[in-house]
Image (cartoon, helix red, strand yellow):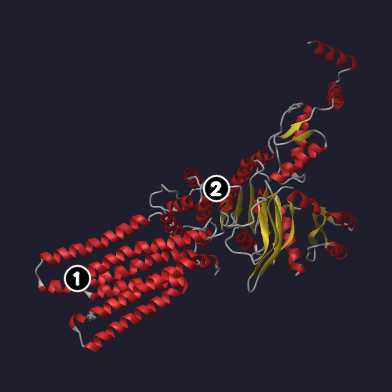
């Protein structure tokens, strides 16, 4: 509850409503398309859906994650309205820390769900790649906080995209336009990102108070 | 004099501006006006006092007992409101009420909604309430004031509360401030800043004048009005009077300026006239004096 | 209470004078409390320090006295002084009466007779 309240302090009132509305919408889209694919026996349609849905899921997984985390960090930017309010309340630094952890946890659910859906239902690695990218970006946000992170995020996204395309090119695997990584390489990448993410959480919890009282 | 807040050698350094050292003594049970030109350091001082930014040196004592602004008990007793952009841009009245109830034990939601209605801005129950960024500066300030007055506090620190309000609203704000002091019956105090004292003249009991990050004069308004006079005279007599004047305004017909009341007789012997200043006249004289002295 | 915000007379003096008149005329009796400093400031829309200064002046003149935690109480007024005040007032009114009498052509004896008649009613 303490954590929830801290997050509410930064996000405002509609947080829970918006969170579930967005999650529910995403889930509904996936379920309905899954159902449609099961019911409609059309090759072209199948082809379209297997390409389209993973992309949508992946984008959501990525966006959902750092969107939630970000909304906490922007409260610590002196140029933003709200800065003075947040910095004039009792235990602001504590709230900041708790809100970061809460937002991280809340964004893990959809990310994990998309990852699972992608991996198990659609068997499409692009979702795995995107969710891993989402996790990676949350880690970056945690470590750098909002100020510098957009550039790093965009940069990292480009590097990952490029590497993925490069790998596909080298392997000459152009089927459906997406390459499939070998399983052990995928697991290794996932593990590495997970470790990086956990490190970012440790970093953010130990530096949150210091970052809170640092001005401009 | 009982004090509510004292500071000693309070200093905040920036690359192009230094505040301090500020030695302040705010009287308990009164409204103190922080008067100064734009860039005099009023907001910096208020932000330091409210713990939004941290001083490089010096110390502040609140309510005679607290030294650390981060104390939760102390924050609960101070009602602070920034000049602009106090609440996040996307927030509506209900977000503000929600956040305020999270951090302040003595935030009265009903009172907040009632105050919003009185000040004619969106409250929690308004259908299609507008977020802060879609509202005018004046309405944003009204909402922020409603939020701060909905709390049970012992010291209000308001940064430029009147600047973005229309004259009628400013008058209501002054009424509310006097009502706050009356409710406290000597236990509640106010500190507010302004660069235009004219409209809030009758809400100020104690005045602190600032220039270039320094306090140049402070005291009870009635005492200051007896300490200084406004001198006016014929331009022909200016040369005799100028040495004793603090601020100087002269054209080919007349001269005018601020002077110490102690010199009143000498001015009158020179054929000039002296009058008791209003706080507005006093402020202009003071700030001009500071400007001439730089 | 009538206050002129833009008068040459400082507001605190206007307040002090009006309370003084009320105390002298007995409109505010001894032992009564004056309105609270902050309450009066609120009602008059003036700053607290202004009403405080008015009360301090009255207190210096011995008309009122501060009571810890309760505000300002009206002192028992010096009987002799109050009588003097009333005598002065009486003299002034008689002066007026005489002037009117002269204008209306009422003689001294007639005036005294009128007063005697009025006094016995």
Q: Position of residue B20 (x, y in %)?
A: 69, 65
Image position of B115 with respect to A144: above or below: above
Tell which tag, 1 or 2, sits nearer the viewer. Answer: 1
Instruction: Chain letter for mark 2, please.
Output: B
| Element type at mark 1 | helix
Q: Position of residue B19 (x, y in %)?
A: 67, 66
- Say which quadrant the C terminus of chain A sits in: bottom right
Query: Observer-nearest residue: B37 or A142?
Result: A142
A75 vs B190, left or right, is left
For image coordinates 49% across by 58% down, the residue present is: B87
Which mark identifies residue B248?
A: none
Whether residue B213 is visible: no
For image coordinates 34% across by 58% down, the residue present is: A18
Q: Callout 2: 10 Å neighbours few (<14), some, many (20+)?
A: many
Q: Quadrant of residue C39?
A: top right
Q: Callout 1: 10 Å neighbours few (<14), some, many (20+)?
A: some
Whether residue A97 is visible: yes
| Element type at mark 2 | helix
For image coordinates 35% across by 78% down, the residue present is: A157
Q: Which residue is mark 2?
A: B149
Q: Position of residue A122 (x, y in %)?
A: 19, 70
Q: Which residue is mark 1?
A: A122
* Mark 1–mark 2 distance (CA, rounded to whole Å): 56 Å
Q: Residue furthest left?
A: A41
């Amino acid at each position: 509850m303490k954590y929830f309240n801290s997050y509410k302090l930064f996000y405002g009132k509609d947080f829970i409503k918006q969170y579930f509305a967005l999650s529910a919408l995403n889930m509904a889209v996936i379920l309905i398309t899954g159902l449609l694919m099961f019911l409609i026996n059309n090759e072209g349609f199948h082809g379209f859906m297997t390409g389209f849905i993973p992309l949508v899921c992946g984008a959501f997984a990525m966006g959902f994650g750092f969107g939630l985390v970000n909304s906490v960090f922007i409260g610590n930017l002196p140029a933003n309205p709200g800065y003075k309010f947040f910095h004039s309340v009792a235990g602001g630094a504590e709230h900041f820390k708790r809100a970061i952890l809460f937002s991280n946890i809340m964004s893990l659910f959809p990310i994990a769900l998309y990852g699972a859906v992608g991996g198990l239902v659609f068997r499409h690695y692009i979702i795995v790649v995107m969710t891993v990218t989402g996790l990676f970006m949350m880690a970056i946000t945690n470590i750098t906080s909002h100020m510098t992170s957009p550039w790093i995020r965009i940069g990292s996204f480009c590097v990952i995209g490029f590497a993925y395309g490069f790998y596909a090119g080298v392997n000459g695997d152009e089927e459906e336009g997406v390459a499939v990584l070998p399983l052990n390489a995928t697991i290794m990448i996932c593990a590495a990102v997970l470790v990086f993410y956990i490190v970012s959480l440790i970093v953010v919890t130990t530096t949150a108070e210091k970052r809170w009282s640092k001005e401009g | 004099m009982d004090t509510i807040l004292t500071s000693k050698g309070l200093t905040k350094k920036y690359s192009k501006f230094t505040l301090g050292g500020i030695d302040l003594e705010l009287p308990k049970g009164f409204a103190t006006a922080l008067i100064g030109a734009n860039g005099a350091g009023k907001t910096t001082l208020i932000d330091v006092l409210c713990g939004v930014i941290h001083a490089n040196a010096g110390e502040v004592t609140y309510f005679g007992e607290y030294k650390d602004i981060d104390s939760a008990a102390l924050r609960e007793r101070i009602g602070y409101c920034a000049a602009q952009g106090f609440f996040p841009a996307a927030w509506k009245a209900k977000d503000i009420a929600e956040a305020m109830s999270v951090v302040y034990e003595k935030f009265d939601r009903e009172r907040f909604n009632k105050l919003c209605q009185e000040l004619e801005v969106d409250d929690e129950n308004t259908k299609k309430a507008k977020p802060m960024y879609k509202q005018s500066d004046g309405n944003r300030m009204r909402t922020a004031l409603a939020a701060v007055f909905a709390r049970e506090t012992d010291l209000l620190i308001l940064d430029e509360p009147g600047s973005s309000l229309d004259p009628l609203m400013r008058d209501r704000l002054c009424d509310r401030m006097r009502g706050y002091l009356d409710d406290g019956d000597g236990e509640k105090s106010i500190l507010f800043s302004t660069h235009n004292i004219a409209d809030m003249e009758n809400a100020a009991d104690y005045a602190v004048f600032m220039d270039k990050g320094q306090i140049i004069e402070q005291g009870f308004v009635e005492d200051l009005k007896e300490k200084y006079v406004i001198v006016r005279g014929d331009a022909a007599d200016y040369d005799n009077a100028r040495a004793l004047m603090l601020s100087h305004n002269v054209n080919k017909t007349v001269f005018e300026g601020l002077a110490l009341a102690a010199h009143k007789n000498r001015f009158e012997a020179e054929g000039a006239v002296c009058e008791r200043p209003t706080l507005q006249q006093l402020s202009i004289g003071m700030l001009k004096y500071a400007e001439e002295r730089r | 209470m009538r206050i002129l915000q833009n008068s040459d007379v400082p507001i605190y003096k206007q307040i002090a004078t009006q309370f003084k008149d009320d105390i002298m005329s007995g409109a505010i009796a001894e032992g009564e409390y004056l309105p609270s400093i902050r309450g009066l400031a609120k009602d008059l829309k003036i700053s607290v320090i202004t009403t405080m200064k008015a009360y301090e002046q009255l207190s210096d003149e011995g008309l009122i006295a501060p009571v810890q935690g309760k505000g300002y109480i009206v002192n028992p007024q010096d009987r002799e002084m109050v009588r003097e005040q009333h005598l002065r007032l009486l003299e002034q009114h008689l002066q007026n009466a005489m002037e009117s009498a002269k204008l209306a052509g009422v003689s001294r004896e007639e005036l005294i007779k009128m007063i005697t008649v009025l006094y016995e009613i």
